[in-house]
Amino acid sequence: MKEKKVIIIGAAGRDFHNFNTVFRENDLYRVVAFTAAQIPDIDDRKYPAELAGERYPHGIPIFPQERLRELICDLEVDECIFAYSDVNYQFVMGIGAQVNAAGADFRLMGPKSTTLKSNKPVISVCATRTGCGKSQTARKIIENLMEMDLKVIVVRHPMPYGNLVEQKVQRFSTVEDLHRHHCTIEEMEEYEPHVVRGNVIYAGVDYEAILREAEKDPGGCDVIVWDGGNNDFSFYQPDLAVTVLDPHRPGQELSYYPGEVNLRTADVTIINKIDSADPDAVLQVENHIKQANPTAMIIKSESAIHVDRPELIKDKRVVVVEDGPTLTHGEMKLGAGIIAAQRLGASEIIDPRPYLTGRLIDTFKEYPDIGALIPAMGYGDQQLKDLEATINKIDCDAVVIGTPIDLSRVINIQKPFVRVHYELKEQGEIKLETVLTSFVKQYVK
C-alpha cells in the first residue's frame, strides 16, 4: 500500500508527541513536514534524525504555518494533522478549510491513539484555557500527596525551544538544573515552583522515554502528576483527571480546542478565581460543567494572592509584568499582578506601550489586545534583553511582578520591585485532600 504523505501542524509540543507515538514507526505514513505556530523561532529548523528514527535519516523539516497551502501542493500531501492547542473552534476549522481547499484530509487525533500508559498511578492536571490556574492546582495536589509521605514525580507538557536532541529527556531537581538546561522564562515559570518545593520534574521531547525514566527515578516514584500546559489533554492515561476552569472567560470552556475535551473527560473540575470573578460568570461556568460532564465533581477555589512588600504598591505608580502566554494566546486582560495592584491601592498602573523595545514591539503588534501590561516574554536571549530594557525605561515607582518565577534572577531590574505569589484555596465542603485520600487508597500500593 502506498504511504500517505502527512504534514503535522503544531507548536513544538503535541505535534512531536503525535509523531513519536503514532507515525515514527508506522509504514502506512510518511511525515514530510511539520509546520510551526504560536511559539517564535521554532520554524525553519528540523525535527532531528536522532529523534525521528530509522525511517527518517535526514530528519523532518519544520516550516512556518503560513506556508501550509503551498506545502500541501508542492509535497503532494494526503493528510494534515492539527496538533496544537488553546485555539477557538472557528480558528481550528479555518485551518481545516485551508487544508481541504488544498485537497488534503484534515484530522484531529484523540487520547486513544496518543496517550501512553504508565505502570505508576497518574493524576493529570489540565485546563480549559491557558492561565486558568492549572500550575497552582498541580502544586496544591503535589503538596497534599507529599503530606501523605508519597514520592511525587511531575511531568510537564513539552516546551522544547532549544536543542531538541539535548532536550529528549530532561530532569530538574534544583534551580541550578534550570540554568544547566538553558531554560527560557516560560520553562522556568513552570519548573521553578516545583523544584523549590523539593519536587523532581521531567520534561523534554520524547514522552515515552520521559515516562520510563520518571517511573524509575532514583529518588523514588509513587505517583506521577501530569502538569499539563496550553490547555492540551494529557499525554499519559490518567487514573484521576483534574480540569481547571476560569470564570473570567465564561463560555470559553465550550468553545476552545481541546479545552472542552479536558472538561468532558474530567473526574474533578475546579472553578478557580471565584474571589475575583463575577458571581454570574461563576454560575455560568458551573452550569456548563453540569451540562457537558454531569458526573464530574465540582470544587470552587480562590486564587489567593500574597505580596511580599505591599508598601511598594500602595499609593505608588507601578508597572505590572504578567505571565507571557496567559496574556498572548491565553487572551487574558489581567493576572495576579494587576489584581494585586488594584487591591493594594496603586495610584496609577502605567501603560508600558510607549516604552516597548525590540521584539516586545512585535509581540504587541501580534496581540494588540494585551493592554497596559507587560507580558514576560523570554523564549530567547534577545527577548530577555528587550524585556529588561523595556522595564528599565519606564518612569515608575515600582515594578509589580505577577510571574511564577523570581524575574529578577534572569534580568536586571533597576527599580524597586515586588513579587506577587498566588496559591489555590478551596472553598466549600469538597476539598482536594478528600479526593486525593480516596485516590491513594485505590491506586497507590
Image (cartoon, rainbow, N blue to C red):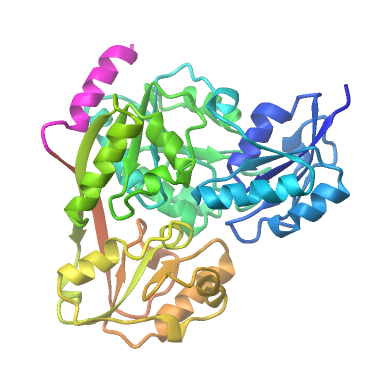
Q: Main secondary structure of the magenta part?
A: helix
Q: Residue at x 11, y 32 (%)?
A: 429
- Residue 298 place in picture, x, y as percent: 23, 33
Magenta run includes residue 443: yes
Question: Is 332 located above or below residue 236 in the figure?
Answer: below
Q: Is residue 348 left or right of residue 261?
A: left
Question: Is 73 located above or below residue 310 in the figure?
Answer: above
Rendered-image quadrant of the N terminus: top right
Q: Residue at x 85, y 36 (%)?
A: 57
Front residue (pair 443, 103): 103
Rendered-image quadrant of the C terminus: top left
- Residue 254 place in picture, x, y as percent: 40, 43
Quarter of the image where one finds residue 341: bottom left
Q: Which residues are magenta?
A: 428-445
Quarter of the image where one finds residue 77: top right
Magenta run includes residue 27: no
Q: Looking at the image, which residue sits at the far left?
A: 429
- Residue 262 place in picture, x, y as percent: 42, 35
Question: Is 181 located above or below residue 440 in the figure?
Answer: below
Q: Is residue 289 left or right of residue 354?
A: left
Q: Is residue 131 left or right of residue 280?
A: right
- Residue 136 place in picture, x, y as percent: 30, 45
Residue 424 in view of the camera: no
